[in-house]
Image: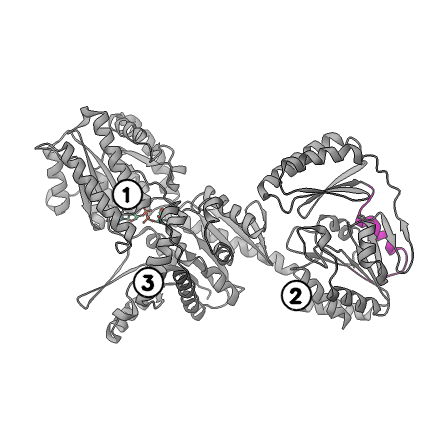
Amino acid sequence: MNKTIIISNRLPLQVKLENDELTIKPSVGGLATGMRSVHTEGNGIWVGWSGVTEEELTPELSEKVQEAITREKCVSVPLNRQDVEDFYFGFSNKALWPLFHYFLEYAEFDKDQWESYKEVNQKFADVVIENIEDGDTVWVHDYQLLLLPKLIKDKKPNTSIGFFLHIPYPSYEIFRVFPWREELLHGMLGADLLGFHTYDYERHFLSSVKRLLKLEVNFNEISYHDRIVKVDSFPMGIDYQKFHNAALKHEQRSPNEKTEFHRRLEDHIESSPDAKIILSIDRLDYTKGIPNRIKAFEFFLDKYPQYREKVRLVMLAVPSRSNVDTYQKLKRETDELVGRINGKFATVSWTPIWYFYRSMPFGNLIDLYTSADVALITPLRDGMNLVAKEYIATRVNNDGVLILSEMAGASIEMSEAILINPTSYEEIADAIKKAIEMPLEEQKTRNHILQKRLARYSVEKWAEEFFKSLNATKTIKEAIVAKKLEKHLKDKIISEYHNADKKLLLLDYDGTLVGFKNNPQDASPDDLLITLLDNLNQNENTDIVIISGRDRETLSKWLGGNGYNLITDHGVWLKHAHKDWEPLERIKKDWMDKILPVLETFVDRTPGTFIEKKNYSLAWHYRKADPELAQRRTVELNTVLTHLISNNELSVLEGNKVVEIKSSNVNKGRAATRFLTDKNYDFIMAIGDDWTDEYMFEELPENAKTVKVGFKNTKAKYYLKDTSEVRTLLNQLVS
Ligand code: GDG
């Protein structure tokens, strides 16, 4: 039976070793909860680090940990102290975390830590490979494992791999700063489906892929070697029922069932019964905007002094990564700020900020959520932010106001909250005032909408949607694989070729026989290609036709003396081997004077583009331009040309990073069929990579072997991956 393998840096277990005592509990985080049902159903396993280093584990403890882990259907990746230091605290949290959260000033790019990051990703891959079977599905999580999808795909190409990033994906302008950026992107592209919390992260990622790897992106699909990688957004939800039910139960508790913490909380509330409670909960992390929030609260108390003694900020900061410098500094800064502000405003009966620096049990978390009139969540950057969602889920009476930073992914789905810019003290202060004064009816209306959405798009639904999408990528894969020229199909074609009497090979040039060059003039044939074509040409009863959009002069110079047939200018000119050129079409060229100045204005406004003037056509090339600008200009150019070209005399072709304008009666399909009438061929094969070759695939007889280079939409019967696969096939025909 096929299984699902979930992989995250940490296992969904809390393994703790204190004074040689081992405690193992399931962890409570959003990811662990969300994936629990996926993990427990079927025979899935979860791969990750246990939280205890190899050095800490005596053989006896190791056995106990192993037993507990296996019982929970988990498999651990052994990490030593140095790994944790360099890979986790080092590279993941000092390079990737700050960079992806736009904190460039905190990002440290250390080569040794990068090496460790690669090694640990490999350690994860080794454990996965050991446990994987054909047909299994893999779901990799988060920024610590960005290289893992490729490491798995390289070893197990038939495995379906999903990847989800829990933190923001930054804009290209930030990502391009990363020293090993291409390697990281290739690592991620090992997946079949890449998921992000929001559409913005998705489009930033696609932009990096287009600009840095120059890959072709079609809406949300990336053509990557012989695969399509799908990219989509899946906003992560919470276990809504768990939070909602806990809050309901909490309400129904008798006084003696209350926790110690809750009684203390109530004592505080009673000491100033009119005071509203404003709650903030986060890991103590610089991305969460904690100092900003405290300063904004100070600003609020200064701007609206009537609220002194009427509000209290209850702030839970959960210790996190406390051995990283920046986090220690943040802790000091937070302590000082809380001290200063409490000193500035406190009265005998009122302390404005009630600050906890610790982690709390789930029950206390619910105590906090349910006691708070307002939740103040102001991260400077946050992938999603589950606390905002949890607060709303616990509002069983529909009251309470959420103030949320627009820099949190959650803000996109939670527009009924009061959204603020976390760097504006003014906005935050005004939002606090608005929240405190908001009529109950309005609170209820807003929360009702929010709750409905959170209940529907829960974390289970999120995981379900992701898997549905990952499964759907299998269909794309199957469609491609079906048309891929696999060995048995190749063997069949080769044998048909050898058994035929009259054979014709129609070969496009650029992108088929040679790869693309930045300057089209640099694509002259190499010696290996000439030898290959010569050998083919000497095969008995084989006619080779190089059929190209290139002009007559260029192809004459490059291939004219070699005894192949040539068709140039998309089908205007034909040269039979060892004969003179003859025109296939009578062409008018007067339109060029009208179109050329228009194209020139596009060149002026689109850096990196240029015009190629051919004898019978004009081509506007944009392969060196910004891909997104070029895409916009192409649409614009098409509109302008439609207005200029009033009859059907001209046609506009969109090739591979080129727009070409030429007479309508010229195309490779017409030219190829005219060549066919010469002899009675019983074997025809046509190979081409771009849009102009589609005419040829369409016009050729049904039994022709039509082959597209690259995985794009096509009328051809088969695909080959790239020019090197084309050359391999042609070599096989020779031998
Ligand atoms: C990353 C991304 C993204 C907090 N304190 C206690 C406690 N918590 C629980 C909350 C919540 C979770 O921790 C925190 O989740 P967040 O989403 O708010 O933030 P990150 O930890 O930074 O998570 C984030 C998330 O991944 C998921 O993709 O939303 O943007 O940064 O569930 O309830 N739980 C307990 N005691 C505490 O003291 N028991």
Residue interval drawn in magenta: 665-685
Q: What residue is pinned by disc 1?
A: 244
The numbered disc on residue 467 is none
Q: Nearer the viewer, residue 197 or 382?
A: 382
* 343 shown above or below 112: above
Q: Nearer the viewer, residue 356 or 264?
A: 356
Q: Residue at x 35, y 54 (%)?
A: 93
Amino acid type, callout 3:
Val
- Which image quarter is the C terminus in? bottom right
Amino acid type, callout 2:
Glu
| Res 413 seen here | no
- State the separation of the CA atoms marked 3 and 2: 44 Å
Q: What residue is pinned by disc 2?
A: 486
Does the CB distance between marks 1 and 2 fall below 8 Å?
A: no
Q: What residue is pinned by disc 3?
A: 84
* 280 shown above or below 165: above
Quarter of the image for residue 224 reads: bottom right
Who comes first in sequence, dot 3 or dot 1?
3
Foreground label between 3 and 2: 3
Residue 324: x and y in percent read: 29, 54
Amino acid type, callout 1:
His
* 230 shown above or below 390: below
